[in-house]
């Protein structure tokens, strides 16, 4: 069942990503040579209107290959008027950026489902732990946290995220009580039992049933939270505050999906589906963000070359760009091997 859930979730996320590339390329008159879901050997497929539609063996990726991209898949008699490099630069930019954008759109659709069925959680304090900084600062049960260190707070999980990332540094809190907004500065205290810094909130979530226009606003907040946590995690990795051992690949993600499914299944089909939708939402945002990083072989790396072309008015030679992306692909493969090793170590330990 873990494998089935993994294939379904990854398949939907990759399909959305590649369909974004495909749709904008087709609208711009770019010839799509192959639209593939999965990697590795071909399982099945068909050919229609000059495009091969393929499902491949390994459900960990996909591809939307354009004619002439990186100097590959060109017609025998040379580049045609429908090749990637023959299209206007802004058409190519839209085709490249559409993949990540469609991942964010998918995340928002999943958020609509989650919030529509399960509601959401407002950051309202339920209780205060005696002797901790929150009590000393005068915060009470019923106060609504509206910002932490200047960052707006919309869902309660952001409190945990911000507290974890803040560590023991002073933290400025804004909260609302009886319609009035107050501000205070708190220095979190390290708790030996939990092994992390605490403010002293004993519960900080209030259930809200979202309906009407609130459904759309709270769905946006869900996507915003996933986007925020993804970006902050990447920043921690770059700054050395997180270890490369914390990285997970397909095996680690499959293990997470299996654990969540096992814990959710006893509570019924609805809880199981909502839990898997929540994972899919986070993974879709992750894929969108990672693909926009300005690294070779990723959509963000291709976008850098296209923006340079838009500024200077002429393209960088495709063969040179292709060499850069190939080097990036080799580095990406090496990273995948490292991440796979991490996943296997965690799995068997």
Image (spheres, rainbow, N blue to C red):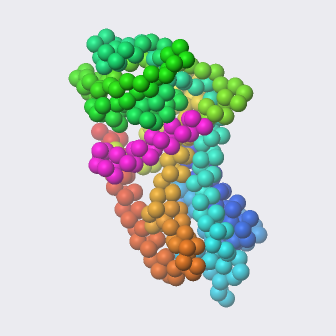
How many numbered marks does the figure carry?
A: 0
Q: Residue at x 61, y 53 (%)?
A: 101
Q: Position of residue 183 (x, y in %)?
A: 41, 24
Q: Is residue 91 left or right of residue 298?
A: right
| Residue at position x 35%, y 41% in the image | 347
Q: Front-most of 200 and 281?
A: 200
Rendered view: 286 above or below 171: below
Q: Is residue 47 above or below residue 194?
A: below
Does 174 appear in magenta?
no
Residue that protrudes farthest toward the right in the picture: 49
Q: Residue furthest left?
A: 192
Residue 262 in the image: state x and y as whole percent: 49, 29
State the image quarter where residue 296 is shown: bottom left
Instruction: Evaluate whether residue 306 shows in this view.
Output: yes
Regarding residue 116, the answer to whether it shows in the image is no
Q: In the rendered view, tell whether residue 207 sits above or below residue 230.
A: above
Is residue 61 toward the left or the right of residue 88 in the image? left
Q: Which residues are magenta?
A: 220-243
Is 230 within the magenta?
A: yes
**Residue nearer the viewer, 2 or 126:** 126
- Between residue 245 and residue 44, name the one nearer to us: 245
Along the line of sight, which residue is nearer the eye, 194 or 212? 212
- Residue 27 in the image: x percent, y percent? 74, 65
Residue at image coords 63%, 45%: 106
Quadrant position of the N terminus in the picture: top right
Q: Name the chief secondary structure element in magenta.
A: helix
Query: From what the image shows, is residue 57 above or below residue 265?
Result: below
- Looking at the rendering, which quadrant does residue 133 occupy? top left
Q: Position of residue 209 (x, y in %)?
A: 64, 21
Q: Does residue 225 appear left or right of residue 193 in this picture?
A: right
Residue positioned 49% across, 76% down in the render: 322
In the rendered image, the quadrant that contains the C terminus is top left
């Amino acid at each position: 069942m873990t494998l089935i859930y993994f294939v379904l979730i990854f398949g939907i996320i990759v399909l959305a990503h590649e369909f974004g590339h495909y749709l904008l390329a087709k609208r711009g008159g770019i010839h799509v040579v192959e639209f593939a879901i999965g990697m590795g050997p071909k399982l099945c497929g068909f050919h229609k209107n000059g495009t091969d539609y393929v499902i491949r063996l390994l459900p960990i990726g996909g591809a939307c290959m354009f004619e002439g991209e990186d100097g590959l898949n060109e017609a025998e008699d040379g580049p045609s008027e429908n090749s990637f490099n023959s299209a206007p630069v802004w058409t190519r930019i839209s085709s490249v950026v559409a993949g990540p954008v469609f991942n964010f759109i998918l995340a928002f659709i999943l958020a609509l489902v989650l919030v529509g069925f399960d509601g959401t959680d407002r950051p309202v304090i339920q209780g205060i732990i005696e002797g901790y900084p929150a009590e000393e600062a005068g915060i009470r049960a019923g106060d609504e946290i509206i910002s932490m260190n200047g960052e707006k707070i919309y869902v309660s999980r952001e409190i945990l995220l911000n507290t974890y990332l803040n560590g023991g540094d002073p933290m400025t809190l804004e909260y609302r009580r009886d319609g009035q907004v107050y501000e205070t500065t708190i220095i979190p205290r390290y708790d030996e039992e939990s092994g992390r810094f605490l403010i002293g909130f004993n519960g900080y979530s209030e259930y809200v049933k979202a309906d009407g226009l609130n459904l759309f606003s709270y769905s946006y907040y869900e996507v915003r939270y996933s986007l925020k946590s993804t970006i902050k995690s990447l920043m921690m990795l770059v700054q050395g505050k997180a270890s490369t051992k914390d990285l997970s690949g397909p095996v680690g993600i499959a293990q997470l999906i299996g654990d969540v499914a096992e814990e959710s299944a006893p509570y019924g089909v609805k809880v199981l589906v909502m839990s898997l939708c929540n994972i899919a939402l986070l993974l879709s945002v992750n894929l969108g963000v990672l693909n926009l990083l300005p690294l070779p072989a990723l959509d963000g790396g291709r976008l850098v070359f296209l923006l340079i072309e838009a500024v200077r008015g002429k393209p960088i030679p495709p063969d040179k760009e292709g060499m850069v992306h190939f080097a990036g692909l080799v580095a990406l493969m090496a990273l995948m091997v490292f991440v796979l090793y991490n996943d296997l170590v965690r799995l068997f330990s």
